[in-house]
Amino acid sequence: MKTAHYNKETKKLLGWYDKEINNKIPTPNIEVTNEVWKLAINENANYVDVANKTFSVKDFRTADEIEAELLEAEIYNRKNNGEDYSLNGTDYKVPFTKNDGDAIMQVNAGFQIGLVETKVHFSNGTIMPIKATEFQEFAVWFVNKRNSFFI
């Protein structure tokens, strides 16, 4: 037999105990067979149906928490997947991560000391050749896109 400790209000599973191992078992709790315990463990159950002594998976997040996580995932994907930038008839998938911003700053520094052309290596594997004469327009586009994540 195993003992499941749970939250009285939410029925969220808080932990498993075994009377042969644990001297003190918190309440509220219910005793279940080893078979029920194994099923609950295998499905990563986190919710207790006390009346039926069954366990299942339940999402305990609030609607606001779910919305915030979805927004965070969307921003992450947009930053890492990037957007197309068209240069000399070719579309390049340009991401907007911190490392990509650092790369743009390094390219800018190179152009300021007289570099005429180079290749920007982005975090997603995109390699974009660019000339000093094309850089200003690209840099303004990049900065505006990247800044949109922080507004």
Image: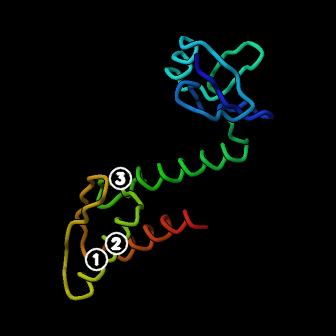
Find residue 149 and report its image quarter. bottom right
Q: Return the residue nearer the eye: 88 or 100.
A: 100
What amino acid is found at the position of numbered circle 3 in the picture? Lys
Q: Residue at x 66, y 19 (%)?
A: 31
What is the residue that sits farthest to the right in this orientation?
A: 9
> CB atoms at circles 2 and 3 under 8 Å apart?
no
* Mark carried by residue 93: 3
Q: CA distance from mark 3 to mark 1?
A: 19 Å
Q: Earlier in the sequence, mark 2 or mark 3?
A: 3
Farthest residue in the bottom direction? 113
Left or right side of 62 for 74: left
Mark 1 to mark 2 CA distance (whole Å): 6 Å
Name the residue tied to disc 1: 106
Question: Which label belongs to residue 46?
Answer: none
Residue count near mark 2 (Cα–Cα under 10 Å), binned few <14, some 14–19, many ≥20: few
Secondary element type, mark 1: helix
The tag earlier along the polypeptide, 3 or 1, is 3
User: Quick check: marks 1 and 2 in contact, CB under 8 Å?
Assistant: yes
Position of residue 96 relative to residue 25, above or below, is below
Q: Nearer the viewer, residue 82 or 14?
A: 14
- The residue at the point 78 percent across, 33 percent down is 8
Q: Amino acid at mark 1?
A: Gln
Location of the C terminus (image quadrant) = bottom right
Residue kind at label 2, given as amino acid type = Asp
Classed neighbour count for the residue bearing mark 3: other residues with Cα under 10 Å, few (<14), some (14–19), many (≥20)? some
Residue 6 location (% of width, % of height) = 70, 31
Instruction: Quickly name the residue at label 2.
Output: 102
Which residue is depicted at the point 64% across and 26% down? 4
